Image: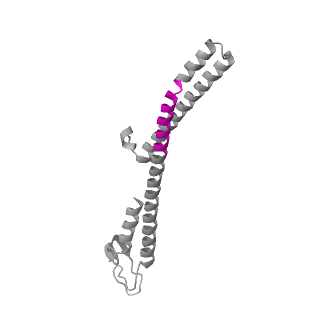
């Protein structure tokens, strides 16, 4: 809209001739001169039209041109910034999504570790503290994967904001 406004002001500043000015009024003239004369009272019509002799409105044209250039540069800067934010959001989402999927696969391999720690405790080869430490470490790993999923979902929301529309998982991968 700023570019359109600047273009409109540029077109307006290129006009050389202005529209004529029409005046309408009522006038009373009393004649106080010696020798008499008649008084006048009645409607008065007038037209005023400025005719340019030299390069008129040059400053307006220069101002309109610079305003148009500034608005166009601002529009280009905003577009480039939006494209950069979209690319960054997409890269962040892809990286977090891949990390979350890889962590989930790795976490699946840790299920046997809980069974092994339990079997070791039942066989008397480890203490309760060892079993609880192992289970706590597994729980921490699962929570870390959930945090990674949460970060990937937040990145997906940021990607949707940057794209300006709702995305399905197939759109961004």
Q: Position of residue 76 (x, y in %)?
A: 43, 62
Q: Position of residue 137 (x, y in %)?
A: 62, 26
Q: Position of residue 96 (x, y in %)?
A: 50, 40
Of the pair 65 and 8, the residue shown nearer to us: 65
Of the pair 120 and 156, the residue shown nearer to us: 120
- Magenta part, dominant SS: helix
Q: Is residue 38 left or right of residue 78?
A: left
Q: Quadrant of residue 15?
A: bottom left
Task: Establish if 19 lies above or below 163.
Answer: below
Residue at horizontal 37 percent and vertical 73 percent from the top: 28
Question: Which quadrant holds the N terminus?
Answer: bottom left
Membership of 172 in magenta stretch: no
Task: Establish if 77 lies above or below 158.
Answer: below
The residue positioned farthest toward the bottom in the image shown: 35
Residue at horizontal 56 percent and vertical 23 percent from the top: 113
**Magenta residues, as a range?**
92-111
């Amino acid at each position: 809209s700023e570019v359109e406004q600047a273009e409109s002001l540029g077109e307006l500043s290129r006009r050389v001739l202005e529209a004529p000015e029409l005046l309408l009024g009522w006038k009373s003239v009393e004649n106080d001169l010696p020798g008499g004369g008649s008084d006048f009272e009645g409607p008065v019509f007038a037209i005023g039209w400025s005719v340019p002799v030299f390069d008129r409105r040059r400053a307006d044209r220069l101002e309109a041109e610079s305003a148009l250039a500034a608005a166009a540069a601002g529009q280009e800067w905003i577009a480039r910034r939006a494209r950069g934010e979209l690319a960054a959001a997409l890269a962040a989402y892809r990286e977090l999504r891949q990390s979350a999927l890889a962590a989930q696969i790795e976490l699946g391999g840790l299920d046997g570790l809980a069974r092994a720690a339990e079997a070791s405790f039942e066989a008397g080869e480890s203490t309760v503290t060892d079993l609880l430490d192992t289970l706590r470490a597994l729980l921490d790993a699962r929570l870390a994967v959930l945090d990674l999923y949460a970060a990937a979902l937040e990145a997906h929301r940021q990607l949707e904001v940057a794209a300006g529309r709702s995305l399905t998982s197939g759109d961004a991968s």
